[in-house]
Amino acid sequence: MKEFEPKIVYFLCDWCGTGGCETASAHHLYYPENVLISRVHCTGSLSAVHILRSLIEGADGVVISGCHPGDCHFETGNYRARRRVAVVKSILETLELGPERVWFRYVAHGEGRRFVDTAAEFNDHLKKLGPNPLKLRRDT
Amino acid sequence: MSKVFKLDESVEKSVKKLLTFLLNKGRIRGALVLQKTDGNSAVAYSLITDADALASACPLCPLMPSNAASVLSRLTLQESLPEPLAVVLRPCELRGFIELVKHGQGSLDKFLFISSVCGGVYPLKMVQVDGSVGEKLPQYWDAVKRAEIAPEIRPTCRACERFVPLGADMTVATMGESGLETKCTIFLNTDKAMGFIEGMEGKLAEEKLETEAIQQHKQKRKAEKNKLYDEIGLEKYGLSGMIDMFGKCIGCHGCSQVCPICYCEVCTFESRDLEPKPAEFERDLNKKRAIRVPPDTLFYHLGRLIHVAISCVGCGSCTDVCPVDIPVSSIFLKVRESVQELFDYVPGMDPEEAVPITKFETEELVEFED
Ligand code: SF4
Ligand code: SF4
Ligand code: SF4
């Protein structure tokens, strides 16, 4: 049987997140091909609804990476994002809809290694979890 | 001990008397209260400036025909009130309005908030279908007098632990008050309230708001809440349960229309952005070979939860209007509690405290970092 290959949506902020990704490419570091990068201006501008929509419309998991605390290009966007992610994960947890399919991890501009490691680690994590049941349903 | 004003007429009559006094003295420009329609068959919020029109008002009628929070937001969205307006509303409605104001959807200026220790309200369907609320009133007030939960009130109210108003200028005592038909005690919570009643016939005194009866009633509501948790049994739902529960949703979005917290002019879930396009149907069909149409029922409800969980005041309006009897607010109950606990937040409690999702601490929630 073909090994399950998760579909991952990776939201990166335009600044540190994207920077980390570019640093990775400059160093020829690779991340799994099943990771779909989606850039947002700031993690603070990412709507919680987008996270949910990704999970409903076909993603097995969602990662969000922005600047480390204190480094946000817009100063406070990452702190706001953290609150939003906390809300989404709490809701998914209470309803038992798989909060573990959403990750929030800071990646700095220079952290190309951390970026590819996160992608690979999340990929392994989702392989263990299996396909997201939400995306498989025909009756939602 | 708190200041109270005592009148010797029934609670309902006393509140009307108070409003009449305020109108006649010119202390308020008008009053927003529940009023019976001329045919007596319906109850609706009305703005009243003529004291005579108060004759058909029923300020404490146990119904919530629309959520006063949304009404007040509409009145003050553009600018705050030019002159004082007295409003008689339920504790959850007041909290809803305070929450809306915090979201920039209105202004608290110049309101005189009159609320009551709340015995709950009946489902709207009881008025629409058989008009039976009138017949229930004696049994309702009898239960309130004995500090019991009135039979047949909405499940949300049975399980509501915040039935003592927060943020009201005046609080009408009801729970456990044995002489409801002949006398009325109104707590004067603010200096503003003191000023408004000055010169009115009645007796000033001091009493304790949170009586023994109220404490005991709180325990009863708490027990009902736990019962409701068990009935709904959210934890055994998981994905399949959620899909089943919302499976009969007809997508009317009535639950969001009546929700005081769902204030967006254009709802995300009604926007073109989320309107499925033919190519998207095609894409989904290629993947799944069968899909529910219109799609996104669960998406709508989870999305709504994400938007309202933090500010949901548990008013129960959403459940009340659902045409297919989905217990929306009961499902939301546990979810909103978990989110509100996360930030130690009580919606509508303190107008000065910002909604948690609009602020942050630099050091917090590290457990949500991966
Ligand atoms: S939810 Fe609570 S405050 Fe609101 S009407 Fe019911 S009992 Fe009263
Ligand atoms: S009111 Fe009921 S049927 Fe209408 S959208 Fe809400 S849950 Fe669905
Ligand atoms: S979600 Fe339901 S219970 Fe909560 S505030 Fe809105 S209408 Fe009231």
Image (cartoon, coloured by chain):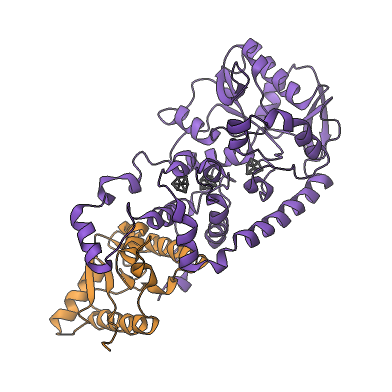
Chain colours: A orange, B purple
Left-right relation of A80 to A34? right
Q: Residue at x 59, y 37 (%)?
A: B125
Reply above or below: B257 against B49. below
Where in the figure is residue B239, as x and y percent of width and height? 46, 67
Of the pair A113 and B332, the residue shown nearer to us: B332
User: Is B184 situated above or below B125?
Assistant: above
Report the front residue among B301 and B369.
B301
x and y, in percent, of residue A23 in the image: 18, 78
The C terminus of chain B, quarter of image: bottom left
Residue B184 in the image, given as x and y percentages of width and height: 80, 28
Q: Residue A9: in sight, yes or no?
A: yes
Q: Residue furthest bottom?
A: A1
Residue at image position (75%, 17%) is: B200
Vertical arrangement, residue B229 with respect to residue A21, above or below: above
Is B117 rendered above or below residue B244? Answer: above
Give the quadrant of residue A36. Answer: bottom left
